Every structure is written in structure tokens, then in C-alpha cells.
Amino acid sequence: QVQLVESGGDLVQPGGSLRLSCAASGSIFVLYTMGWYRQAPGKQRELVASITSVGRTNYADSVKGRFTISRDNAKNTVYLQMNSLQPVDTAVYYCNGHLPATAGGGLDAWGQGTLVTVSS
């Protein structure tokens, strides 16, 4: 199982941008489907975006056109570029690693979370 460490959370004004990073340990990172989730105060954790081992991406409707997920397998890192941020995007953002059953399966890996606050 990979170990995940997020970084990049910060306080940003509405309309601003941030890039989150998630560094993974382990040699089979390339096989993982990686995702970014977020949890706002008083709300359930929700999927923001995901990217498969072959680069197929998926986004929540609320972030389509504003957020971009990408991965650099050479650096064992997944990114979330967030543009046009709004106060509703305020949340703790978590990195997730999911190994498909076809690649061995097992428990998902989670990072510790990084706080994004959008406020003027």
C-alpha cells in the first residue's frame, strides 16, 4: 500500500488559484487510480476528481472546467490544479489511492488532508 502526503493547501481569495500535490511512496504508484476528495465542515466527504493509471479523468460536476487533476508517475505525485476558487470550495482536501482488483486490490490509501480556505 502506498503512503500519501498532501501539500499545497492555503488561504486564497475568491477567484484565485491553488495547486495541491500528493506525494506517494511505493514502487507501484503507477498502477493506482488516484483521487482527490474534500470534506467541508458539517458535510460528507465527496469525490472531487480522479485519474486512472492510464490517465482517464473524472470530475465532480461542481468543479468541471475549473479543476484539473494530473499525475507524474516518474515523481510518484498527483496534482490538483484549482482555478476560479470560490468560498464553497473551502474544505479539507484528501488524496486517495485505489489499487484496482485487477492489480491486486486491497484497502485504499488516504493522506492526512490539507486545508483549503477561500475567503476575502
Image: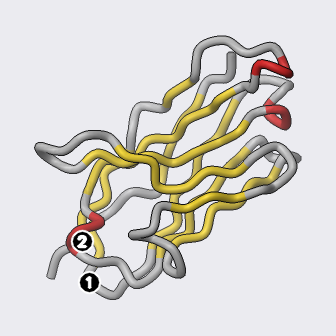
Q: Is residue 18 above or below residue 46?
A: below
30 relative to 65 in the view: left or right: right
From this viewpoint, which residue is outermost toward the bottom?
A: 15
Residue at which label 2 appears: 118
Along the line of sight, which residue is nearer the eye, 106 or 61?
A: 61
Q: CA distance from mark 2 to mark 1?
A: 6 Å
- Residue 32: horizontal and vertical position, in percent? 75, 33
Q: Is residue 18 above or below residue 51?
A: below
- Residue 102: horizontal and vertical position, in percent? 85, 21
Along the line of sight, which residue is nearer the eye, 21 or 31?
A: 31
Q: Residue at x 58, y 22 (%)?
A: 108
Question: At label 1, which amino acid type do we have?
Answer: Pro
Q: Residue at x 71, y 27 (%)?
A: 25
Q: Is residue 93 above or below residue 3?
A: below
Q: Find out whether the residues at labels 2 and 1 contact each other: C-beta distance under 8 Å.
A: yes
Q: Considering the image in quadrants, where does the N terminus appear? A: top right
Q: Considering the image in quadrants, where does the C terminus appear? A: bottom left
23 relative to 63 in the view: left or right: right
93 relative to 104 in the view: left or right: left
Here the colouring is: secondary structure
Question: At label 2, which amino acid type do we have?
Answer: Val
- Residue 19: horizontal and vertical position, in percent? 52, 66
Residue at which label 1 appears: 14
Mark 1 nearby-residue class (10 Å; few <14, some 14–19, many ≥20): some
Closer to the N terminus: mark 2 or mark 1?
Answer: 1
Residue 104 disc label: none
Q: Residue at x 87, y 49 (%)?
A: 54
Q: Residue at x 63, y 62 (%)?
A: 69
